[in-house]
Amino acid sequence: MKKHHLQLKLGKSELLVIPAYPSINQNFTVQLSSLTLMPTKTARNLGVILDEGLTFTDHISATARSCRFILYNIKKIRPFLTKQATQILVQALVISKLDYCNSLLSGLPASSIKPLQMIQNAAARLVFNQPKTTHVTPLFISLHWLPVAARIKFKALMLTYKTLSGTAPSYLNSLLKAYIPSRNLRSTSDRRLVVPTQRGVRSLSRIFTHTVPQWWNALLISIRTAESLTIFKKQLKTHLFRDHLTNSLKNKNKKKNPQTYTYTSTLYTLLPLASLLKTTMRRWTQTTAWML
């Protein structure tokens, strides 16, 4: 800290213990100069609220609460704003909060990030001045917004590409390892990453070194082997946009219009009955002619 001309503020110092297993005893203190530090449940660092289980529940709740208050104030002046002005306000004040350090939320279940998704849904409805019951997928497509889960994946994969190209911070280089086969294969030029094995610890599936390689290897080869960051960013957003919005909208439309499948199944059901009826009528005609 002396090297960077920084001074430690004892009054703002906090002790946060992140154990490998929840059963570890944390009843201990740390003596820092004249201050005795006790372990706390949460601690704030660079605007992010960290908890001892790294569930980010408090951080998500605080972010959702702050965004909800901003949306409430924008809604008051919405009648005096145009759609474009409202979109600029929402993106500057709300969406920026949802995107801040969102790569830390990689690997969290959908139920954990649902409050943030509800905020984004409310923001999209506010831009178009639509009621709460309006379906948000067409609004996202019109605004070119990715859902929260896709935005988290987008940020993490952008860091991955920068790491592989040597433009990311040096501390990320040790977290990712390129896949190099033992012999010359066609997959050598696919730019894959090694996925570490997971043995017994469920929480390992949420760490950066385990989640991001799986996402990266699932991308198309043309995206992984993009020549520049600009091309990769454009192709990645198009891929996520199609995966999370366009395809989901098509699936929902199929569920809403099942008449085609009903008619098809009914037709296949009636065909055997028609054939049986035709055979019965032919036999009845032959029997009647013989009797006459």
Image (spheres, rainbow, N blue to C red):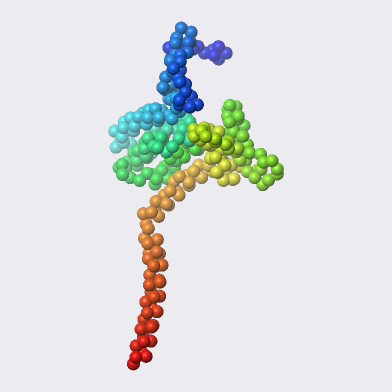
- Is any part of residue 85 visible from this angle? no
Q: Nearer the viewer, residue 134 or 174?
A: 174
Q: Name the residue rendered at 60%, 30% in the picture.
A: 173
Q: Position of residue 172 (x, y in %)?
A: 58, 29
Extreme residue toward the right, this view = 184
Q: Nearer the viewer, residue 279 or 85?
A: 279
Extreme residue toward the bottom, this view = 292
Q: Quadrant of the N terminus?
A: top right
Q: Name the residue rendered at 41%, 49% in the picture.
A: 249
- Is any part of residue 6 visible from this angle? yes
Q: Position of residue 150 (x, y in %)?
A: 46, 40
- Res 146 quadrant in image: top left
Q: Position of residue 242 (x, y in %)?
A: 48, 47
- Res 288 quadrant in image: bottom left
- Res 52 quadrant in image: top left
Q: Quadrant of the C terminus?
A: bottom left
Q: Position of residue 70 (x, y in %)?
A: 34, 30
